[in-house]
């Protein structure tokens, strides 16, 4: 039966046909590695069940493969060159968004939602990315995180809820089970025979893992991937526990659930790059009101599409793709004064809602995405801009004269160090060590023939028209999104 009840929004009353709850579950540095994406070496029953109950996007992309910057995009619907969060927030890195940016929790609060976050945050300032509640929990312990969210989910309230829950798995380093002083490997896994509360550790045989084409198939790499798989399996158990809490509260039938990662795996060749290994990310979306289930969508979507999609579900998106006038009227003015301000108007987005295409396998008009990366750590200035179509992809390395800068954890990765010690001509995936460090200004790839981006076609005379066409697209994208780095076309 249709349930209708009023929700008070400051000075107006809106009507919801159902609670329309939202959960956004974000993992840290995870490629589309799970059984439902075709990697049967990895056991992920809860991720697979979510995909079977919703839509799996085969081509989902972050816009920048850097934790803080990507999360700023996830929570604003704006590329980081427009929201101001160019790189990491924590410590001396010091990046944060402009003071007048409006984030997803603020939009949903204005739409009558109660909001909470649990786990990794990594964006700033807090007055821009403000939630009603903070739910504690070791972000390496996903079952505890899920259990700690139970009371928020089941709270006796007429307001729908928005839960933003972010693990630190499978990020390199940090975290430990409560009884352990440290972890023995680089993906947060506890010592043999130990585990996090409520978790059964799944140990993988390095000989059985799948090595993606952008990485070297070496014993060292296989050992690291096995550790990464173990961390992903821990996430899967926490995901299952969270979904069960929603079902126990009898709210699953009215809950939109999204499972994504901020970007791809924490390995050189993926994280901090805009190669496919860095950009390609999992995206599972379960819309409770979509009749078609188990859909595998071929649409190209990116993280700038998330905020418009969630506002669309919440009833706060107009037919013009912008936040509705009523929603904007109810936005608090707090946090919009002082500090540097973006030129981006509140309620406008760089992406668009994909809510209406969740039931379609081959929707029309979803055939390209764009990416924008500038920093990771503050010492890592290497701006890249990307246009990615189905067949061709163009990367513009604006600072190509510099050697490619490494994140501290990726430089120390055993897989990289083993190949680096072999010299500049040593293979690294489809590239060489030297080719990975020293890059051309433009990189053009035919992804159908060369999915792991080993052959740069930018210097090929037979691809000159394609190169020029994509350059034009890239310039237009930068102009439309007010990218400060668009001026680099005119000098340097």
Image: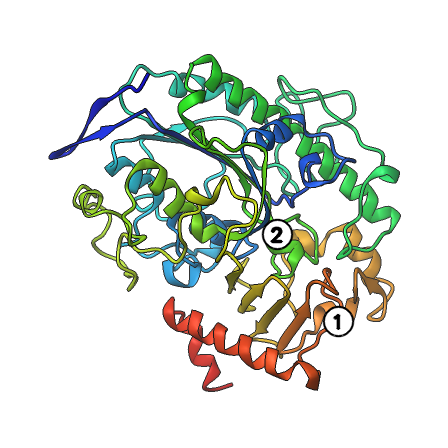
The location of residue 305, given as percent across then percent down, is: 43, 50
Which image quarter: residue 192?
Answer: top right
Q: Is residue 206 left or right of residue 391?
A: right
The location of residue 93, given as percent across then percent down, is: 48, 56
Q: Which residue is mark 2?
A: 280
Residue toward you, 121 or 216? 216
Which image quarter: residue 171?
Answer: top right
Residue toward you, 257 or 147? 257
Residue toward you, 106 or 9? 9
Which image quarter: residue 109?
Answer: top left
Task: Determine the residue positioned at 82% across, 55% down.
Answer: 216
* Mark 1 surroundings: few (<14), some (14-19) or many (≥20) residues within 10 A: some
The answer to whether 315 is drawn above or below residue 421 in the figure is above
* Mark 2 surroundings: few (<14), some (14-19) or many (≥20) residues within 10 A: many
Which residue is situated farthest in the left direction here?
Answer: 11
Q: Earlier in the sequence, mark 2 or mark 1?
A: 2
Q: Quadrant of the N terminus?
A: top left
The location of residue 207, given as percent across then percent down, is: 88, 39
* Visible residue check, residue 270: yes
* Visible residue check, residue 271: no
Say what secondary structure mark 1 lies in.
Answer: loop
The answer to whether 361 is drawn above or below residue 427 in the figure is above
Q: Is residue 110 left or right of residue 122?
A: left
The location of residue 152, given as percent across then percent down, is: 38, 21
Residue toward you, 412 or 284? 284
Task: Determine the residue positioned at 60% across, 78% down.
Answer: 466
Q: Which residue is mark 1?
A: 455
């Amino acid at each position: 039966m249709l349930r209708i009840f009023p929700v008070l929004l400051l000075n107006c009353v809106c009507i919801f046909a159902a609670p329309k709850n939202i959960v956004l579950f974000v993992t840290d540095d995870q490629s589309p590695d799970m059984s439902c994406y075709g990697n049967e070496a990895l056991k992920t029953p809860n991720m697979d069940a979510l995909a079977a109950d919703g839509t799996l996007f085969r081509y989902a992309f972050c816009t920048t493969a850097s934790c803080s910057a990507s999360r700023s995009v996830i929570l604003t619907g704006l590329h980081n060159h427009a929201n101001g969060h160019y790189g990491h927030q924590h410590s001396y890195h010091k990046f944060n968004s402009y003071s007048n940016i409006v984030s997803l929790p603020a939009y949903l609060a204005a739409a009558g939602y109660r909001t909470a976050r649990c786990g990794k945050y990594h964006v700033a300032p807090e007055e821009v990315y403000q939630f009603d509640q903070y739910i504690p929990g070791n972000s390496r312990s996903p079952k505890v995180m899920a259990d700690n969210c139970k009371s928020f989910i089941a709270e006796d309230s007429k307001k729908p809820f928005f839960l933003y829950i972010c693990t630190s798995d499978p990020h390199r380093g940090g975290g430990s089970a409560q009884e352990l002083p440290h972890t023995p490997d680089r993906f947060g896994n506890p010592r043999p025979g130990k585990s996090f509360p409520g978790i059964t550790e799944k140990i993988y045989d390095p000989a059985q893992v799948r090595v993606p084409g952008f990485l070297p198939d070496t014993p060292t790499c296989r050992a690291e991937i096995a550790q990464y798989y173990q961390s992903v399996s821990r996430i899967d158990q926490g995901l299952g526990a969270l979904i069960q809490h929603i079902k126990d509260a009898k709210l699953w039938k009215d809950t939109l659930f999204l499972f994504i990662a901020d970007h791809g795996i924490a390995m050189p060749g993926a994280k901090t790059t805009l190669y496919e290994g860095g950009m390609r990310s999992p995206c599972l979306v379960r819309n409770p009101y979509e009749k078609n289930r188990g859909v595998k969508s071929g649409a190209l979507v990116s993280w700038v599409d998330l905020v418009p999609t969630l506002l669309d579900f919440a009833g706060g998106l107009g037919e013009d793709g912008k936040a509705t006038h009523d929603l904007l009227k109810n936005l608090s003015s707090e946090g919009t004064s002082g500090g540097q301000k973006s030129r981006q108007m509140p309620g406008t987005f760089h992406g668009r809602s994909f809510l209406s295409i969740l039931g379609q396998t081959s929707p029309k008009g979803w055939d390209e995405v764009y990416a924008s990366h500038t920093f990771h750590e503050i010492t890592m200035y290497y701006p890249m801009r990307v246009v990615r179509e189905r067949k061709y992809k163009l990367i513009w390395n604006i600072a190509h004269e510099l050697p490619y800068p490494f994140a501290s954890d990726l430089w120390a990765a055993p897989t990289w160090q083993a190949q680096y010690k072999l010299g500049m001509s040593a293979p690294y995936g489809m590239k060489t060590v030297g080719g990975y460090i020293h890059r051309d200004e433009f990189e053009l790839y035919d992804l159908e023939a060369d999915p792991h981006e080993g052959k740069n076609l930018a210097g090929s005379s037979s691809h000159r028209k394609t190169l020029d066409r994509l350059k034009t697209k890239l310039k237009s994208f930068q102009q439309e999104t007010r990218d400060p780095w668009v001026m680099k076309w005119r000098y340097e």
